[in-house]
Image (spheres, helix red, strand yellow):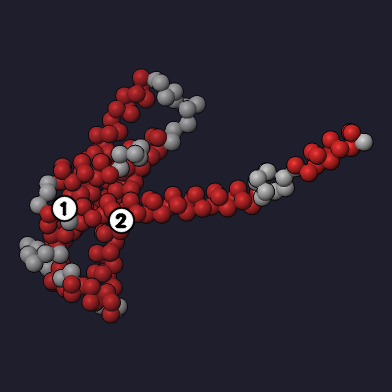
Amino acid sequence: MERYKRNSKCKSTQRGPGEGGMTRTGDVGGGKKEAGQEARKEKGGTVVALGVPMKYNYTSGRDAHATTLSLFNMLSSYPWDAKVVLVLAAFAVNHGEFWLTVQLQTVNPLAKSMSLLKQVPDIIEHTDVLKPRFDTISNLIKAMLDVTNCIIEFKELPSEYISPDSPDMSMAMAHIPTDAYWTVRSAVACATQITMLMGPVHV
């Protein structure tokens, strides 16, 4: 009888799933999904926030160096490769908005209205004159992407190929902050040029 009571007591204190005991697999999956969504929201908010000083660098009168440092301050908690990727994402949002407006303004009423606000018709009229500037921006964007890909690939090198403590690795790692700085500063310069193209004088 005493043994039975002990067993009964153990059974009565056992907790089923969802009652403070073991967590159900679905709950774990749901928690991971929610955490992933929160992380995406945070990064999305960061991208939007980064786009503001980049977009208005020219009109605010700040130089590219000061804006670049402010972007790095906003990204102080991220590693170097993430800093560059997030800045390029912010630049892509603004840059993409501009070029979509240029391409769609003849077929989409909303894009046409946006093009008038951004003075896109004036830009199209001066396409031949502005082509060298467009080409320069495109070449710089390509270089920014190439450097960013190199940084990401380097950071993802498996440790079995090269030791993190090797002199070669240490030397290469020392260059990443400089590469990241000039990539971000180039993004700021491109954003400034696009803002200038939407001003009253382009040539």
- Report, in whole angstroms, how far the alpha carbon at label 1 lies from the one at label 2: 15 Å
- Give me the residue at 15% from left, 42% from top: 65
Coordinates of residue 26 in the picture (x, y in percent)? 64, 52
- Give me the residue at 15% from left, 71% from top: 119
Q: Nearer the viewer, residue 22 or 86?
A: 22
Amino acid at the residue labelled 1? Asn
Amino acid at the residue labelled 2? Val
Count of marks overlaid on the render: 2
Q: Residues within 10 Å of mark 2 (few under 14, many from 20)?
A: some
- Give me the residue at 80% from left, 39% from top: 9
Residue 98 lies left or right of residue 24; in this view the side is: left
Residue with the most extreme right position: 1
Residue under circle 2? 48
Vertically, is 69 above or below 113?
Answer: above
Vertically, is 117 above or below 180?
Answer: below
Coordinates of residue 201 in the picture (x, y in percent)? 7, 65
Residue under circle 1? 57
Residue 183 lies left or right of residue 127; in this view the side is: right
